[in-house]
Image (cartoon, grey):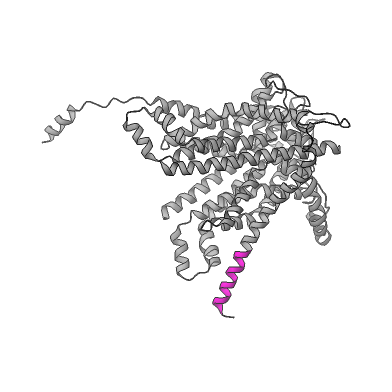
Amino acid sequence: MAAAIEASTAAIPPVRRVPDRFRTLTAVVAATAPLVLVVIVAILYQQAAPSVRHFGLGFLTGVDWNPVTDSFGALPAIFGTVATSFVALALAVPVGVAVAVVLAEQGQTTIRGILGTGIELLAAIPSVVYGIWALYVLAPWSFAHLEVPISDRFGFIGWLSQPGVRSLFNASLVLAVMILPTLSAISREVIKAVPRGLKESAVALGATWWETTWRVMLPSARAGIFGATILALGRALGETIAVTMVIGNRYAIPPSIFSPAYTLASVIANEFSEATGTLYPAALIELGLVLILVTLVVNIVALLLVRSTSREASRAA
Amino acid sequence: MNRNVRRRYASTVWLGLMYLLTVVALIPLGLVLWFTISKGLPPVLHIEFFTNPFRPFGIPGGGVSHAIVGTGILVGLASLMAIPIGVLGGVYVAEYAVDPWASWVRLASDVLVGTPSIAIGLFAYALVVVPMHHFSGIAGSVALAILMLPIIIRTTEGAVALVPNGLRESGLALGLPRWRVSLQLIVPAAAPGVITGALLAVARASGETAPLLFTTLGNTLFKVNPVADQIQALPLTVYQYALLPYKSLQDQAWGAALVLVVMVLITNLLSRWALRRQIRLAGQL
């Protein structure tokens, strides 16, 4: 019997495996994306090499930025970048999650469609347009109606004193507006990915809309919302033009959030095309290297978090 | 008050608050549009704004024609580089989704989307400006192409994945080779979605300033040769003029911002329309 089967299968001619050249070709073309990513880091490292060798790790903790004496340190720019981004997150996360909750509601009503389109258009507006608006409209308004009243009342706290039109706070304000669409779009997706059964069970137990949202939906989507927050953080860290236009561009750790400051990206934007010598441009590129490495880590962590939540959700469903 | 009534009221209050916050989130959109239109419209209403290039402060009749044409050239060249690579890459990621390499490409694209555009500008500087020894339009285009690439890869992938498997299987059953199935059956069926991606990428690239700062650098003259010359772009115009102390140039910055916003919004609406066609088309197949 076994021999008969063997004989019959042997009679079938072996399938001629055609090498899938299309697959090879497109795979090579697709390699552009990972390749570019690797080459960006490699080339920036190579260009920053003089500064990396000269300053070593001290570059990250140095507070000087003096092209005349060739003395460069990144700490004030790192501080400014991190501070603007976190203040922006603090402002944007509550609003962004509320938007996501509203947009993730079931049933396609007209009003939700309009709101969703509006939020998406917010993401489409170019950064420089936010910049000019922030420079001429938002920053003067925020100075008069937020910074001055707050520092009048709470100015005895050092980091709420010294209001100024160009300030770390105003840069954070415009950043908050700019990261909101990222935050709400991804949070909406993860909230939507929460299995229907969970929500229905809560409703069946008599929970109100808010109890369902607050105690069931949001906790299940927690990791994904956290991922969306980190993704927005990555955007905020790297945002250049709008921040450069309102932050005041002063290379020092600011005494107050209402004081002018500087970020990694704005230092590069302002100074790179005029940097001469060897060490000065290399130091600027090293700032870029610091920025890109931080955003790479932040982005990868965020993507893994968002993916793991949606996968978990689909498994539960 | 009855506890359950209180719970129901609380729920309604919270629901209202959530909607309120959503409306608050849209206030900046309204304000940005309002100020761009009200401040940008007066300069845009002069025909010289579109027909003349830069004129120094004090000489009337200056415009941004050099920047509008320049943005067209820079983004056009970037599209020529990014769209073919992006579409083929997207087809690979969707058609061979089970390949481990495809998931690496996907991850790299997602990371690349979030890479700071200023770092991409530095990269294009090192890659193109340093060997050429001068700033040029082509360096700016390379930077923009890198920005566009991941957007096109991901949207193409999404559009191809929407095409029903039956179409793929019928092509293969007829004995067509994989490349003909992909390029002659799947891509045409996914065309509206692919166009959506290209449009979104073009919109993003036309609005970017940071990668152009030290690649094309900008120009006050009307220049069209991307290899030999620095080329002006609209977002650069907004950035440079807005920071100048001259009222007439600040007005032109608002005008340029308005042109930019209108361009970007039109491209976005077009892409939505294309996406809706895609979804309808996929439903019919």
Residue at 54% from the left image edge and 76% from the top image edge:
B4
| Residue A247 vertical placement versus A9 (above, below) | below
Q: Residue B196's image quarter?
A: top right
For the C terminus of chain A, the quadrant is: bottom left
- Near-viewer residue (B37 or A259): B37
> In the image, is residue B140 above or below residue B7?
above
Can you say whether A311 is above or below A157 in the image?
above
Q: Residue B190, position in %: x, y?
A: 47, 36
What is the residue that sits farthest to the bottom in this orientation?
Answer: B1
Residue depicted at x 45% and y 61%: A198
Q: Position of residue A262 (x, y in %)?
A: 76, 42
- Residue B145 visible to the viewer: yes
Instruction: Work out which residue is located at the far right of the displayed protein and give it.
Output: B58
Q: Nearer the viewer, residue B169 or A44?
A: B169
Identified at 22% across, 25% down, the residue is A13
- Residue shown at 48%/37% (left/top)? B157
- What percent of the width, then of the height, locates residue A312? 45, 52
Which quadrant of the rendered structure holds the N terminus of chain A? top left
First to last magenta residue range? B1-16
Q: Is residue B280 magenta?
A: no
- Quarter occupied by residue A45: top right
Tally of marks: 0
Q: Is residue B157 above or below residue A95?
A: above
Q: Position of residue B279 (x, y in %)?
A: 48, 44
Kindly report the secondary structure that dominates the magenta region of the rendered protein: helix
Tell whether position B8 is magenta.
yes
Residue at far left of view: A1
Q: Nearer the viewer, residue B180 or A99?
A: B180
Give the left or right position of residue A12, taking residue A267 as reference: left
Residue A61 visible in this rendered orientation of the protein: no
Q: Nearer the viewer, residue B34 or B50?
A: B50
